[in-house]
Image: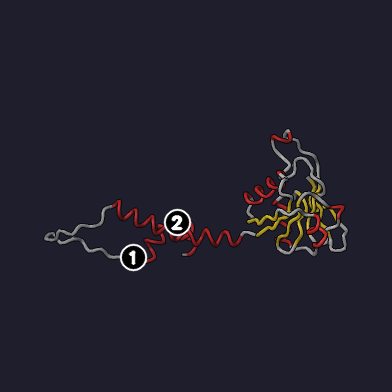
């Protein structure tokens, strides 16, 4: 029944608490509620029931905490892209060099922003698909990196870049600093 409440909250109202409304007596001036008032009441209750479902959905989306320079537009575009692709975000506008070093991501994999999600370090313009895959597969690793700022990667794409798409690789970075190709684009 819980899945029905998410797909069709009005069905939940109908099935959750059936109410018997007696037909008015021919001698009574009481009338049944109008369709409009019943519909408005039902929709109000349905909206109330949907808020917890929407809140629960937001809580199941992984949180990506990002460190970036406050003036970097491509970082903001990457964060917006993550939000459109199933992630919640928290942004720290403090730069990322110190946090990258503190988290153990080798400088050779550096980019303009550093993030943490699910205990993994994410460096640079990593596609959401690979972050979801990382969180699902849970490999023994430090995290993922897209070194530099390749044109065509998320946040470095679109008309402002002439819709150009350069080849790049997402690297799986081990805790010892070694890496291997996780996905090529």
Secondary structure of residue under mark 2: loop
Is 4 placed left or right of 108 in the picture?
left
Identify the image quadrant of residue 119.
bottom right
Q: Nearer the viewer, residue 27 or 104?
A: 104
Choose between 65 and 44: the one closer to the eye.
Answer: 65
Per the image, label 1 sits on a secondary structure element best described as loop
Residue behind mark 1: 18
Q: Where is residue 163? Give x, y as percent.
A: 72, 35
Q: Give the residue at x 23% y 57%.
A: 32
Q: Residue at x 65, y 59 (%)?
A: 62
Comes first in the chain, label 1 or label 2:
2
The residue beneath circle 2 is 8
Badge 1: residue crowd in 10 Å (few <14, some 14–19, many ≥20): few
Give the residue drawn at x 41%, y 58%.
46
Q: CA distance from mark 1 to mark 2?
A: 16 Å
Residue 151 location, quadrant: top right
Where is residue 23 shown, x and y percent of the image?
20, 61
């Amino acid at each position: 029944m819980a899945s029905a409440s998410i797909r069709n909250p009005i069905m939940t109202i109908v099935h959750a608490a059936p109410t018997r409304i007696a037909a008015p007596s021919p001698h009574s001036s009481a009338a049944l509620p109008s369709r409009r008032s019943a519909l408005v009441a039902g929709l109000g209750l349905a909206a109330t029931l949907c808020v917890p479902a929407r809140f629960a959905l937001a809580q199941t989306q992984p949180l990506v905490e990002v460190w970036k320079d406050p003036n970097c537009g491509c970082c903001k575009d990457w964060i917006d892209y993550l939000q459109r692709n199933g992630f919640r975000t928290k942004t720290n506008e403090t730069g990322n060099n110190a946090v990258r070093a503190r988290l153990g991501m080798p400088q050779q994999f550096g980019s303009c922003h550093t993030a943490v999600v699910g205990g993994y370090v994410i460096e640079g313009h990593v596609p959401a698909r690979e972050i979801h895959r990382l969180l699902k597969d849970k490999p023994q690793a430090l995290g993922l990196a897209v070194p530099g700022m390749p044109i065509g990667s998320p946040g470095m794409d679109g008309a402002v870049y002439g819709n150009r798409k350069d080849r790049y690789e997402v690297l799986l970075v081990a805790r010892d600093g070694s890496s291997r190709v996780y996905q090529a684009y």
